[in-house]
Amino acid sequence: MNINTCEKNNIEDLILEKPKKIDDIYISNINFTLQTPRLLINKISKKITLILNENMEKIFSDFDNKIIELLSKNSSEFFEEELSIDESEEIYKNSYKNSKLESKINLSINNKITIFNKYKEILDINNLCSGDEVICLIKCKKIIFYKNHCEPHWEVFQIKLKEQQLKKNEYLFVEDKNDNYIDKSINEQDDTYNVNKIKIKE
């Protein structure tokens, strides 16, 4: 399997197959697998939403631009008319959503997804929650064509949970003003002191 990264990828070599009708939609096959850097989970339910960093924004933008280019280039073969780059861009829905605060991507969850911890032990998907830091293997196997637009279908099939390690001997307790605990260490020290002064008769 050819796994792409933000630093090294084969986006320029992507091939988009002619759309084929499946049920009521058309699907164009493609093959692109990507390993993400560390990202935060924004939400997880039937899908998983990741918050993107600048590197991920760039690689998804590069991917989207390449698909738009291929749509235009192959439009006479794929469609009943030729489409310019601008026209192809109008019908294409980008991989991720960009807002003023943050960029996110929604990923389908593969039925056979595998999740690992740092010890390479397998976890259940219920072990994941919002705010977790993860590295994911994701793939786009198809571009789906609807009546008025087309979009890439991204899914995650492996996840590595990056568990946050606490600092050694880090004190985590929150100070409680209502804590009625009485420290008996002083009395215990006094008792110990008195015991130490006792001389044992031989």
Image: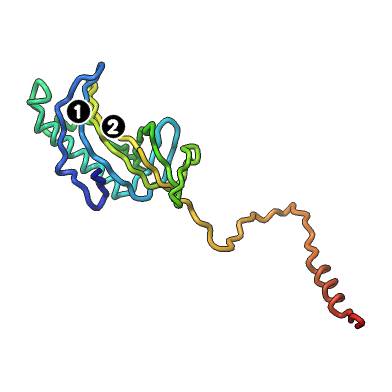
- 168 left or right, relative to 74: right
- Circle 1: residue type: Ser
Q: Find numbered disc 2 in the image and state the secondary structure of the residue it sits on.
A: strand
Residue visible at 26% across and 46% down in the picture: 3
- 147 left or right, relative to 168: left
Residue visible at 15% across and 36% down in the picture: 15
Instruction: Characterize the local packing of mark 1: few (<14), some (14-19) or many (20 or more) Cα atoms within 10 angstroms.
Output: some
- Circle 2: residue type: His
Q: Quadrant of the N terminus?
A: top left
Q: Nearer the viewer, residue 148 or 137?
A: 137
Q: Find numbered disc 1 in the image and state the secondary structure of the residue it sits on.
A: strand
Residue visible at 8% across and 25% down in the picture: 77
Which residue is outermost to the right? 201
- 11 left or right, relative to 165: left
Q: Which residue is mark 2?
A: 153
Q: Which residue is mark 1?
A: 28
Which residue is outermost to the top? 24
Residue 101, picture quadrant:
top left
Residue 12, picture quadrant:
top left
